[in-house]
Image (spheres, grey):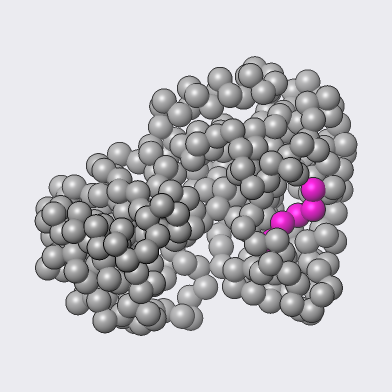
Amino acid sequence: MKILFLQTAFLGDLVFSTALLHAVARIYPQAEITLLASPRGGGVMAGDRLVKATIIYDKRGREKGLRPLLRLIAKVRGGKYDLVVSPHRSFRSALVARFSGAPVRLGFRSGWGGWAYNRGVPFPAGEKRAYLRELKLAASLGGEVPTLRPLLFPDARSLEEARRLLARAGAGEGTTLVGLVIGTVWATKKWPTGHFLELGRRLGRRTDLSLVVLGGPGEAAEAAAFRGDDGFVNLVGQTTLPQLVAILSLCRVVVGGDTGPLHAATALGVPVVALFGPTDEEQFDFLSPSACLTVDLPCRPCRPHGSRSCPIDDWRCLPEISAAGVAEAIRRIVEI
């Protein structure tokens, strides 16, 4: 049996969808699974042995537009899949599923593309957690579906590369790694750079601790503030997605806002200090002994995914989370 798993949304969305992918694999243990993902997410599952092949679809870049989409559909049809699974509720994903040639197409029968699926369930809007909503799709296939958590695995090659990157950047061998995720797509979900710098000062220059700063090329300007002389190990914009997953897996704790790498850390089994502002922390589960820090304001949460600017021009929900509080949460987790 051949299965196409279609999830071309952001990195965090693919992380949550790993629970559904593993549930489908348990229902069809002999199946060959191909993942169709965007460049933002595809590499995150490099260490998952359930995924036999990956198709990268750059829908916002070089493959934007109708002709590349038609070529993708032709490629998918050529794969002769028996089942297409798509938790992504978008019109484009629905088109790929509908014209895939697969006899069974599993997705949510609501939203922009519900017409594309001949097997599925109504979107369970009452459930806040994405991975539990998506597991309803697996249940529609029949049989008993265990409640799985999102799961990620680093691959061996990327782990070796990650250790070399850390060593070259100044992380001492055998030190406790604290990951600091400074970036996010939405500005209102980003803890201020100055707070991260203050966090470094509060944790102090310790020979047994390495503060690993992580982010994409879009955070290059901010990353310049994190100097090795101040105890930071700056890897912003210097990792592939598989290497990022590997580095996160080596951390004792990861600090960041509501963003893909933070959720990837949880899927890897790494405790986090999650900093939530405009979005609802009840959408997510965090592993013990993780901490989720918020500020009690009547206006939050205000957005399901964050926004580029505060809707009431009074952005306090993240700036008012103190570096002192984050430092204390880190100390409780890593016992320093």
- From this view, report whether residue 325 is shown above or below residue 158: below
Q: Quadrant of residue 207?
A: top right
| Nearest to the observer: residue 199 or residue 235 | 235
The magenta segment is 189-193
Numbered circles on residues, count: 0
Does 62 sit left or right of 53 as displayed? right
Does 330 sit left or right of 2 as displayed? right
Query: What secondary structure is the magenta-colored segment mainly?
Result: loop
Residue 7 can be seen, yes or no: yes
Residue 336: say if magenta: no
Q: Position of residue 280 (x, y in %)?
A: 64, 70
Q: Give the residue at x 70% y 61%.
A: 187
Q: Position of residue 153 (x, y in %)?
A: 42, 39
Residue 190: say if magenta: yes
Q: Position of residue 152 (x, y in %)?
A: 43, 44
Q: Give the residue at x 38% y 39%.
A: 46
Residue 254 can be seen, yes or no: no
Q: Give the residue at x 15% y 59%.
A: 77
Q: Position of residue 217 (x, y in %)?
A: 61, 43
Does 97 sit left or right of 315 as displayed? left
| Nearest to the observer: residue 167 or residue 24 | 167
- From this view, report whether residue 280 is shown above or below residue 162: below
Quadrant of the image for the C terminus?
Answer: top right
| Nearest to the observer: residue 260 or residue 19 | 260
- From this view, report whether residue 299 is shown above or below residue 155: below
| Nearest to the observer: residue 260 or residue 55 | 55
Q: Quadrant of residue 228?
A: top right
Q: Quadrant of residue 63?
A: bottom left
Q: Give the residue at x 25% y 76%.
A: 116
Does 202 sit left or right of 2 as displayed? right
